Image: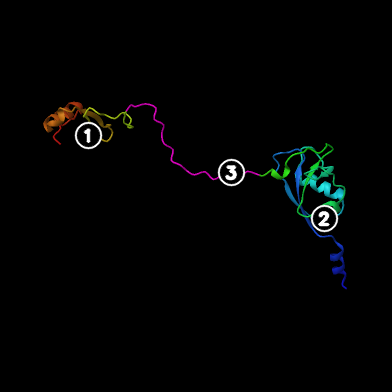
Amino acid sequence: MPVSTRRKAALPPTKTVTVYRNGDAFFPGRTIVLNPRQVSTFDNLLSTLTKRLEAPFGAVRRLYTPTQGDRVQSLDQLKHGSAYVAAGNEPFKLLDYSGIVTMKPQKRRHKLIQPVVRTRIVASARWKKITDGTCTINVFTNGELLVPPARVRIPKHTLKSWESVLSMVTQKVDLRTGAVFK
């Protein structure tokens, strides 16, 4: 028989266990694979659990069963697929460790947000909207590049006649040539 098959037969099988923190009702537990090549002694297991669990009580010194709190003393007492509670020097705290689960956030359905109606005032959303029927125009003088445009506000009654609009623009814009015809 080759040497490699004898070594494989001599090693105990790999075990997978779930380990909880003692007294932590919000820690969902860590699944740890116990390979006999990496974890050969019980002390080695405790140091591995200290690194993996990041326990607030410090180093893991004891291992308990989650239901009765019986202390585990050796690697042979560990069973594949079972759960255990890791503790420091403090005594075992009885909790429902198997009932601890992580809550995954639920996907929110995107709803359209409707505006809240607080008043019954009906108002336009435009800023400074003119509602009296007047017309505002910007008049540029032809050929004068440096002169800014003149802003002319024409009332509602003046808009009825084209001649009155031209005369109003002539008054507001001071042309060198005289009156505005177009």
Q: In the visual, does 159 lie left or right of 39?
A: left
Dominant SS in magenta = loop
Three-letter code for the amino acid on which mark 3 is drawn: Pro
Q: Is residue 71 magenta?
A: no
User: Can you tell which mark lies on residue 141?
Assistant: 1
Q: Amino acid at mark 2?
A: Gln
Q: Three-letter amino acid code at disc 1?
A: Thr
Q: Which mark is residue 105?
A: 3
Q: Nearer the viewer, mark 1 or mark 2?
A: 2
Q: Secondary structure at mark 3?
A: loop
Instruction: Indicate the secondary structure of the residue bearing disc 2.
Output: loop
Q: Is residue 20 visible?
A: yes
**Can you say whether 157 is above or below 80 in the image?**
above
| Residue 104 location, quadrant | top right
Nearer-the-camera pick, 5 or 12: 12
Between the residue at mark 3 and the residue at mark 1, the CA separation in whole angstroms equals: 66 Å
Instruction: Determine if the magenta segment contains residue 111.
Output: yes
In the displayed structure, 100 sits above or below 134; it is below
Q: Residue at x 88, y 69 (%)?
A: 3
**Where residue 38 is drawn, which disc sits there?**
2
Looking at the image, what colour scheme do you see? rainbow
- From mark 1 to mark 2, how far is it between C-alphas? 91 Å
Label 3 crowd (10 A; few <14 / some 14-19 / many >=20):
few
Q: Quadrant of residue 54?
A: top right
Upstream in sequence: badge 2 or badge 3: 2
| Pointers 2 and 3 in contact (C-beta within 8 Å) | no
Of label 1 and label 2, which has the lower sequence position?
2
For the record, the magenta segment spans 102-121
- Horizontal and vertical percent for residue 61? 84, 42
Query: For the residues carrying marks 2 and 3, which lies nearer the camera in this image?
Result: 3
> Crowdedness of circle 1 by 10 Å Cα count: few (<14), some, many (20+)?
some
